[in-house]
């Protein structure tokens, strides 16, 4: 399907009660030529990683991946996935790359994050913002793995608040002199190519960040010891220090002072790789859990025959299918040249990381006591998965980003309408039209009288009509909710995190449901309803889940216990914890 690169975000338009179905229908497929390439990649990955299946647990315990194995990754071309063919890489699309990370994650999280940190964020800035000269200089070495890349943004005092970084660079002739420390850098100790963000403004300025390409052979670049982590233990994570490092001006990535834009673009582009890895883990957990359920006999029959086990497995299937639907759809938006996908990418990161956590937790529960033992893969998968809700943007911060970014356009347009009322009595006839338009737009949002022709699908298969109707109704409710929140809080919405989170959860659910509707509808159109019975069941179950969660969030917009919860939090903060005791 062709997508207008300048069309607005799908989710932002849901906030107006409009469904941009051309962005999501029909559901996308990987191109045939790339399917063949991917099949070869998948086969190669299995040949490489299957012999090491027992090693992964040992490397996790030691907290280190041997250099000989890193060399194998290089020889198999796993550091070349996104590098253009003209520079010696595979030149994979976002879709094929995400699918490749899915395969890696099925085998081992540390392997997936080593490859992913290199391609998803480490060298992504070079591909997005690098000059032709910079690409020609670095891409061939990055493709072979002669250079491994890492992304250096986080600092001891600057995590989610990236604008508060202390690392700084000062221009000195033809060079920039770089000083500072970066924290928790994946691949830091094995990298030769660092995408580094430093302040280049005056003292006390929060903005004016610039991105630099730094290489390990520059004097003053050092790394700390490998961090002792809860999960992904075999992947390399270190501090990186820069002590009067002279960086040539030719190594500035993008524009001077525009580094924050570079960082956000990198993270937005890289989040679908994390989503792909999450899907891979979920598929593996389903394979393990179904086998365990069939093999383990309790009270005279396999536990697979018990209702509560079936409930776990069925829910895991739903989570995996809908996550894959959303991740693949966003991959396609990016591959199609769509520019405004940051919110949708953030949604896939949040939903995928949390669905993966639930899936692993339930798989471990199905395994019972075995799930708690280190000789089985469940506990390692759980430890490895936990960081996904933290790195590349914490899910808490991303929820605020999703809601505030999506609401911004609504707020801007309503503000525009309000400002247009000025001077209306200078021209009563024209003024009457402006007032009428403003009143209609406000009333449309506030009383759920949004044009129904905007809040509808026209191209979905009739087999999914019941779920389509639910989606359309919830879309109108979302627009009403956004208007109510903006009316209530206005510009103060920035500090109303409880309200923002509710709206974000509503938006997340609606986008994932839209992706699932598209996937199932397209499958029915291509194969017939009789051939996709189970997919229709997944859609029905997930639609019910979304409807219940959405209605609960909607009901709490005006009636909630937010202030009571904050009061209790303040009490704990004042007294450093819990103060009641039975003794």
Image (spheres, grey):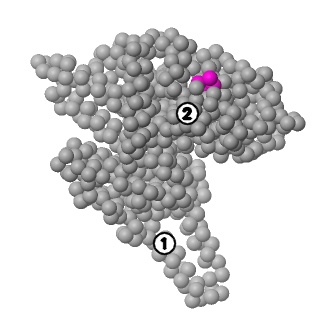
Note whether 139 is above or below 69 in the view shown: below
Q: Quarter-wise, where is residue 324 in the image?
A: top left
Q: In percent of the image, x 79 and y 27: which residue is there?
A: 245
| Secondary-structure class at tag 1 | helix
Picture coordinates of residue 50, whole percent (x, y): 38, 18
Note whether 351 is above or below 367 in the view shown: below
Q: In percent of the image, x 48 and y 51: which residue is there?
A: 336
**Do the numbered discs 2 and 1 sit on residues whose CB atoms are within 8 Å?**
no
Q: In percent of the image, x 60 and y 16: which residue is there?
A: 226
Judged left or right of residue 165, residue 328 is left
Q: In percent of the image, x 50 and y 48: which residue is there?
A: 334
Q: For the stretch drawn in magenta, what is the main secondary structure?
A: loop
**What stretch of residues is rendered in magenta?**
145-149
| Secondary-structure class at tag 2 | loop
Q: Residue under circle 2?
A: 89
Judged left or right of residue 310, residue 372 is right
Picture coordinates of residue 66, whole percent (x, y): 53, 12
Picture coordinates of residue 471, whole percent (x, y): 33, 57
Q: Nearer the viewer, mark 2 or mark 1?
A: 2
Q: Residue under circle 1?
A: 441
* Depth order, front residue of 92/536: 92
């Amino acid at each position: 399907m062709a997508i207008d690169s300048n069309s607005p975000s799908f989710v932002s338009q849901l906030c107006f009660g409009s469904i941009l179905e051309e962005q999501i229908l029909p559901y996308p497929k990987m191109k045939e030529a790339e399917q063949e390439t991917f099949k070869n990649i998948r086969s190669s990955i299995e040949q490489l990683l299957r012999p090491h299946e027992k090693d992964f647990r040992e490397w996790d315990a030691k907290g280190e991946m041997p250099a000989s194995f890193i060399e194998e990754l290089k020889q198999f071309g796993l550091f070349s996935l996104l590098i253009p063919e003209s520079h010696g890489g595979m030149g994979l699309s976002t879709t094929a790359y995400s699918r490749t990370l899915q395969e890696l994650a099925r085998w081992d999280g540390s392997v997936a994050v080593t490859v992913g940190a290199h391609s998803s964020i480490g060298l992504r800035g070079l591909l997005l913002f690098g000059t032709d000269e910079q690409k020609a200089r670095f891409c061939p070495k990055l493709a072979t793995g002669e250079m491994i890349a890492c992304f250096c943004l986080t600092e001891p005092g600057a995590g989610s608040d990236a604008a508060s970084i202390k690392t700084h660079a000062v221009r000195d002739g033809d060079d920039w002199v770089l000083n500072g420390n970066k924290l928790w850098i994946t691949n830091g100790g094995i990298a030769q190519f660092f995408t580094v963000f430093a302040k280049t403004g005056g003292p006390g300025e929060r903005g004016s960040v610039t991105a630099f390409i730094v290489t390990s052979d520059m004097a003053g670049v050092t790394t700390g010891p490998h961090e002792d982590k809860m999960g992904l233990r075999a992947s390399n994570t270190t501090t990186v220090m820069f002590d009067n490092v002279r960086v040539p001006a030719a190594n500035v990535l993008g524009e001077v002072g525009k580094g924050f834009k570079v960082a956000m673009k990198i993270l937005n582009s890289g989040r679908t790789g994390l989503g792909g890895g999450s899907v891979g883990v979920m598929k593996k957990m389903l394979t393990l859990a179904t086998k365990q359920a069939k093999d383990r006999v309790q009270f005279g029959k396999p536990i697979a025959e018990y209702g509560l086990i079936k409930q776990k497995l069925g829910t895991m299937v739903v989570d995996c299918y809908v996550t894959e639907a959303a991740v693949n759809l966003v991959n396609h938006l990016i591959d199609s040249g769509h520019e405004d996908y940051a919110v949708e990418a953030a949604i896939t990161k949040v939903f995928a990381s949390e669905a993966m956590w639930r899936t692993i937790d339930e798989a471990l529960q199905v395994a019972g006591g075995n799930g708690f033992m280190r000789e089985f893969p469940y506990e390692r998968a759980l430890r490895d998965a936990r960081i996904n809700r933290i790195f590349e943007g914490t899910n808490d911060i991303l929820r605020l980003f999703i809601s505030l970014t999506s609401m911004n356009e609504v707020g801007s347009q309503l503000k525009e309408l309000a400002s247009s009322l000025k001077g209306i009595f200078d021209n009563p006839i024209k003024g009457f039209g402006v007032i009428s338009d403003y009143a209609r737009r406000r009333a449309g949002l506030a009383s759920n009288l949004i044009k129904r022709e905007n809040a509808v699908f026209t191209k979905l298969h009739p087999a999914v009509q019941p779920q389509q109707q639910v989606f359309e109704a919830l879309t109108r409710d979302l627009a009403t909710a956004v208007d109510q929140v903006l009316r209530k809080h206005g510009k103060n919405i920035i500090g109303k995190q409880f309200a923002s989170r509710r709206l974000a959860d509503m938006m997340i659910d609606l986008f994932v449901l839209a992706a699932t509707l598209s996937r199932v509808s397209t499958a029915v159109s291509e194969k017939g309803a009789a051939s996709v019975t189970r997919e229709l069941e997944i859609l029905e179950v997930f639609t019910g889940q979304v409807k219940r969660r959405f209605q609960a969030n909607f009901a709490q917009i005006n009636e909630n216990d937010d202030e009571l919860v904050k009061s209790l939090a303040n009490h704990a903060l004042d007294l450093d914890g819990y103060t009641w005791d039975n003794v």
